[in-house]
Image (cartoon, grey):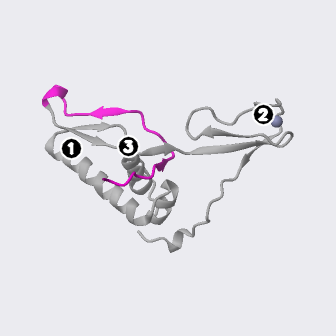
Amino acid sequence: MPRPRKRRRVWREATPAIFKPVGVPLHQLNTITLFHEELEALRLVDLENRYQEEAAEQMNVSRSTLQRIVNEAHVKVAQALTEGAALHIEGGTFRVATHYWQCADCGHVWEVEHGSGQGAPARCPRCRSSYIRLRRMRRRRMDRKSGIR
Ligand SMILES: [Zn+2]
């Protein structure tokens, strides 16, 4: 039985989408599914030029897992583009990153999904105080120069 996969952390959840060749109905095309965590890996590594070590930490996976996700994503995208398949961005094993906010008056802590469009809350949902702050997530500091690409 396959081991249950750990959910990868995604900082920006893409809108589910299908990209396909022009003029061919979808039902006549092969469909390749690109998972949300695969697209996130492409975004971090290819678009934002993160070191793989850093991207791995952002997604909460090992560097070798990140490497595998990126490789699989590259193959899927290349295959869809060259073979004229539909590329369906959908599903996967992931969770969207959250920010933790804390009220300085009552100490209440709550989560806001990253990239949810909710932005910074104005008031504490419990006591209505406006004295709130973003709680730093515990993150190991990375030295970009030490990363391996
Ligand atoms: Zn409060």
> Which residue is at 78% across, 33% downward?
124
Start-end of magenta stretch: 1-28
Residue hosting label 3: 92
Disc nearest the viewer among 3 and 1: 3
The stretch drawn in magenta includes residue 114: no
* Separation of marks 1 and 2 at Cα, in angstroms: 47 Å
Q: Is mark 2 within 8 Å of ligand 1?
A: yes
| Callout 1 crowding tier (Cα within 10 Å): few <14, some 14–19, many ≥20 | many
- Against 36, residue 137 (above or below) is below
Amino acid at dot 3: Gly
Where residue 124 is drawn, which disc sits there?
2
Which sits earlier in the primary sequence, circle 3 or circle 1? 1
Q: Which quarter of the picture shows residue 33?
A: top left
Q: Between residue 77 and residue 137, name the one nearer to us.
A: 137
Disc nearest the viewer among 1 and 2: 2
| Callout 2 crowding tier (Cα within 10 Å): few <14, some 14–19, many ≥20 | many
Q: Which quarter of the picture shows residue 148?
A: bottom left
Amino acid at dot 1: Ala
The stretch drawn in magenta includes residue 2: yes
Ligand 1: give its quadrant. top right
* Residue extending furthest toward the front: 1
Q: Between residue 55 and residue 64, name the one nearer to us.
A: 64
Q: Between residue 4 and residue 134, name the one nearer to us.
A: 4
Give SS at disc 1. Answer: helix
> Which residue is at 79% across, 31% downward?
126
Image quadrant where one finds the C terminus: bottom left
Amino acid at dot 2: Cys
* Relative image position of residue 73 (x, y in whole percent): 31, 51
Residue hosting label 1: 80
